[in-house]
Image (tube, rainbow, N blue to C red):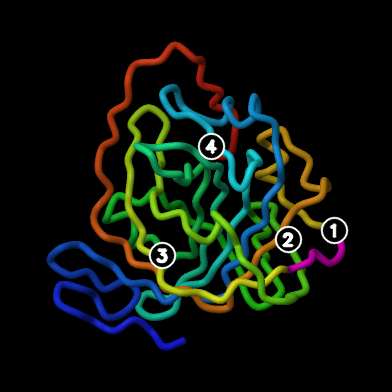
Amino acid sequence: MSPLHAGPGRAASAGRIDRDVRVSLRTRDLVVVSWPIARDDAERLLPAGLEPATVDGRFLISLVAMRHEGTPRYRQINIRTYVAHEGEEAVYFLVTRVTGPGLVGALLGAPFAPSRIAVGPGLVEAPGLGVSLRYRIGDETDPGTIGRHEIGIFGRTRLRTIRIRRGAAVWRRAVAEGHVRADPIAVYGFNPDEPADLLYAEQAQLELERRPTRLRLPVQTRKIDSTGPV
């Protein structure tokens, strides 16, 4: 798959920002590890006003790792769950960590914090975050909704949203090899030793359309459970 090319009003490579604040990312070795959870558990992860959504019939929490090529070149791990937002299924980011060069994204309002991360075909390592994963890449598959989410939401008391356009990607099933260490999943009260589904894409094209915008929700009375990594 060829890298994104600049069109009118678009950036040509990762980290370049045009006047419309669009950023094109050349993403490699994207892996999504998802654990089924109960609806009640999905609800407690969310700020008041957000409602959990199923992904192909199940509530999930996911660990996602990837590396972005271009300028800057950096690695990322995020922990996410899934919500309904204005008629669309969206991602709610619980934790986002990047290697040093990726902190430039904070200038756009991204909720990035630094971590030491290694990502490559078949492996993810982030010792300080408590993440270690080895996996075997399998056959092509339809990723379902996992491969189509374009709305991201983050924050606790001041929610923000961003739209990420997705280009074509070839997705494959993957199988974990050996013990999966995913401490952030355990911190949220889930057992990472439970069976998980893995999806892998060698290359993906992502485009951030704009700066994050404020998300205003109706006042809710449901208690926010703020326990989790910071």
Coordinates of residue 143 in the picture (x, y in percent): 60, 62
Q: Secondary structure at mark 1?
A: loop
Q: Which residue is mark 2?
A: 132
Three-letter residue code for mark 3: Gly
Q: Residues within 10 Å of mark 1 (few under 14, many from 20)?
A: few
Coordinates of residue 135 in the picture (x, y in percent): 76, 69
Q: Identify the residue at the far top of this view.
A: 221
In the rendered structure, are the residues bearing label 2 and label 1 in contact, judged by CB atoms less than 8 Å apart? yes
Q: Which residue is pictured at 64% across the width and 55% down the height?
A: 128
Q: Secondary structure at mark 2?
A: strand
Measure the alpha-carbon separation of dots 2 and 4.
28 Å
Q: Viewed as shown, does residue 47 lie left or right of 63?
A: left
Measure the alpha-carbon separation of dots 3 and 4.
29 Å
Q: Which residue is pictured at 36% across the width and 59% down the height?
A: 164
Mark 2 or 1 closer to N-term?
Answer: 2
Coordinates of residue 73 in the picture (x, y in percent): 43, 76
Q: Which residue is mark 1?
A: 179
Up-down relation of residue 152 to residue 9 (above or below) = above
Mark 3 or 1 closer to N-term?
Answer: 3
Q: Nearer the viewer, residue 195 or 18?
A: 195
Mark 3 or 4 closer to N-term?
Answer: 4
Residue 116 is one of the magenta-drawn residues: no
Measure the alpha-carbon separation of dots 2 and 1.
8 Å
Q: Which residue is mark 4?
A: 53
Mark 3 or 2 closer to N-term?
Answer: 3
Q: Nearer the viewer, residue 198 or 154?
A: 198
